[in-house]
Image (cartoon, rainbow, N blue to C red):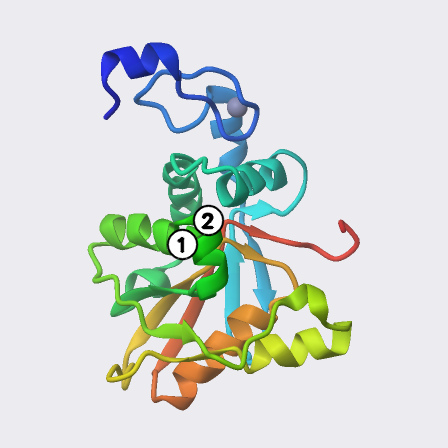
Amino acid sequence: MKLRWMTWLFPSRCPYCRKVIASDRTECEECAERITSEGLRRSLETGNICMAPFCYEGAVRDALHGYKYHGKYSYADSFVKAVLRVLEPEHYQTDLVSFVPASPKSLQKRGYDQSRRIAVGLAKELHKPLVPLLQVGKAYRPQHSLSAQERKKNVWDAYEMLPGLSPMGKRILLVDDICTTGYTLAACSRVLMQSGAKDIFCVTVAIRVQNTG
Ligand SMILES: [Zn+2]
């Protein structure tokens, strides 16, 4: 809850159209209507499914960009609400919520973990424990220094279990902000399944549909 003078100085804005909104709203009314979409579904290389409320384009892409790179933390509330709209019964039957971890380098740069923040909100709404399970391993290299083929392998080998933790027998709701190629979620799902997880259900705010850049 914002203090009154802060609301006056920094009014809440709709993440998708930047219109000023009441402090108890998470987006404007017009954009709220758009959120009630059917949801998108993507099959990952591991056979796991990723669901998202939005296509990664236009206003949603801008909102995610602001959230990820310009410290618009409060957008997480709207993203969580949007994701909740597309969840199916199996998502509610998971044992815990986890998330794709940021690399130490991007954590240092941004100061917060964008996927974790969305996962925190979802865990709270679903009354599930939030359990960080994965970390980015030391072998991970910055993607911009690599060719397309090297990037895929880099992501595929990037993640490992946090020491001392086991997902044995658990059904996991795995959260990330965006699903572009799907390799990241597939790589994380693979590690969790190899470590004994029973099932992985992935959710993101947006999925990049082919041919939309
Ligand atoms: Zn709006």
Residue 21 sits in which quadrant?
top left
- Residue at the spot 47% in from the left edge and 65% down from the top edge: 103
Is 59 rendered above or below residue 42? above
Q: Nearer the viewer, residue 70 or 209?
A: 70
Q: Which mark is residue 8?
A: none
Q: Position of residue 157 (x, y in %)?
A: 55, 82
Residue drawn at x 52%, y 64% is: 50
Q: Position of residue 184 (x, y in %)?
A: 55, 70
Instruction: Locate the N terminus and report the quarter of the image it occupies.
Output: top left
Q: Residue at x 51, y 45 (%)?
A: 68
Q: Amino acid at mark 1?
A: Asp
Q: Quick one: label 2, few (<14), some, or many (20+) residues within 10 Å?
A: some
Q: Is residue 193 left or right of residue 170?
A: right
The residue beneath circle 2 is: 110
Residue annotated with mark 1:
113
Q: Secondary structure at mark 2?
A: helix
Instruction: Give the residue at x 46% y 79%.
Output: 137
